[in-house]
Amino acid sequence: MEELKIIAQTCTNDERIYEIVSSVAQMSDDELSQFRTKVISYFMTKNSPEDKEAYRFYRILLEDQNAKKVLEFYEEIKNNSNNSI
């Protein structure tokens, strides 16, 4: 759960990460399955620390509707920051 909150916090500072999370959250089950297969295939031969971190990010995002959960945390963070102004 903490990893999801970290990703959500990152989304507030990095539009690219937000776009990835948002796109994954909108995928159907079939699209998620196809994308998961592509991610695994792509990262199969990648061994750099950056690649391993990227694979971990996608693996987390593609599990258990986590992308939608990240967006929920993102909205909470945005709302809390707006309320504190």
Image (spheres, helix red, strand yellow):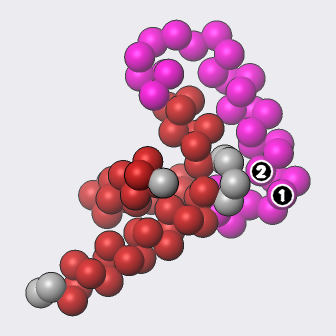
Q: Residue furthest front?
A: 1
> Tag 1, which secondary structure?
helix
The amino acid on which the numbered mark 2 sits, given as a three-letter code, is Leu
Residue visible at 23% across and 85% down in the picture? 82
Give the CA distance from mark 2 to mark 1: 5 Å
* Residue 3 image point, x, y percent: 43, 48
Residue visible at 41% across and 52% down in the picture? 2
Which quadrant of the figure contains the C terminus? bottom left
Residue 80 vertical position relative to residue 23 in the rendered view, above or below: below
Residue 6 located left or right of residue 82: right
Circle on res. 41: none
Residue 63 vertical position relative to residue 39 in the rendered view, above or below: below
Image marks 2 and 1: residues in contact by CB distance under 8 Å:
yes
- Residue 52 magenta-highlighted: yes
Which secondary structure class fits the magenta region best?
helix
Residue visible at 53% across and 32% down in the picture? 56
* Residue 55 image point, x, y percent: 56, 30
Circle on res. 29: 1
Residue 75 vertical position relative to residue 48 in the rendered view, above or below: below
Q: Residue furthest right?
A: 30
Residue visible at 74% across and 23% down in the picture? 41
Magenta segment range? 24-53
* Residue 18 image point, x, y percent: 45, 59
**Is residue 18 something one can see in this rendering?**
yes
* Residue 53 image point, x, y percent: 45, 28
- Residue 47 magenta-highlighted: yes
Q: Residue furthest left?
A: 85
> Tag 2, which secondary structure?
helix
- Residue at mark 2: 32
